[in-house]
Image (cartoon, rainbow, N blue to C red):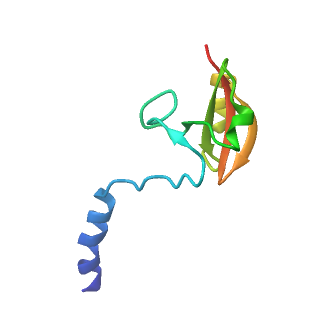
Amino acid sequence: MRFFLLTPALVLAACAPAPEPVTGSLPFFGDGYRFKGDICRRVGEDDFTNQFLDDAADLVGCPEDAENLGVFVIDTGAVEVARRDGYVLYSVPVR
């Protein structure tokens, strides 16, 4: 009988929106990098990130455990510059 009581709760939980990613202290902005909803996002300037900012490149943060980081690097020409708060920071040349 407990199985039947838990089933509606599981169905409702599956329909709930995904939680916002924990961004720690990195100054993320925008709604995905390259496409709306992407897990990688642009990173703004603060005391840590200012050393990685460049007029000819975007600073982008992606979760370290993201599945497609290799594809992201190849597609964008991204260069890893740092890791912080569970994110890999990339300098991505502006095309």
**Residue occupying image coordinates x 69% and y 43%:** 47
Say if 24 sits above or below 3 in the image: above
Q: Is residue 45 left or right of residue 5?
A: right
Q: Quadrant of the N terminus?
A: bottom left
Q: Residue furthest bottom?
A: 1
The quarter of the displayed image where residue 15 is located: bottom left
Judge by depth and name the residue closer to the eye, 61 or 10.
Answer: 61
Residue 88: x and y in percent read: 68, 43
Q: Residue at x 58, y 36 (%)?
A: 44
Q: Is residue 79 above or below residue 10?
A: above
Q: Position of residue 73 (x, y in %)?
A: 68, 30
- Farthest residue toward the top? 95
Depth check: 95 or 15 in front?
95
Q: Residue 49 in the image: x percent, y percent?
A: 68, 39
Q: How many labels were placed on the picture? A: 0
The residue located at (26%, 64%) in the rendering is 12
Residue 51 relative to residue 71: left or right: right
Which one is in front, 50 or 68? 50
Q: Quadrant of the C terminus?
A: top right
Q: Residue furthest front?
A: 47
Relative to the observer, which residue lies in front, 3 or 45?
A: 45
In the rendering, at what x and y percent does residue 4 appear? 24, 78
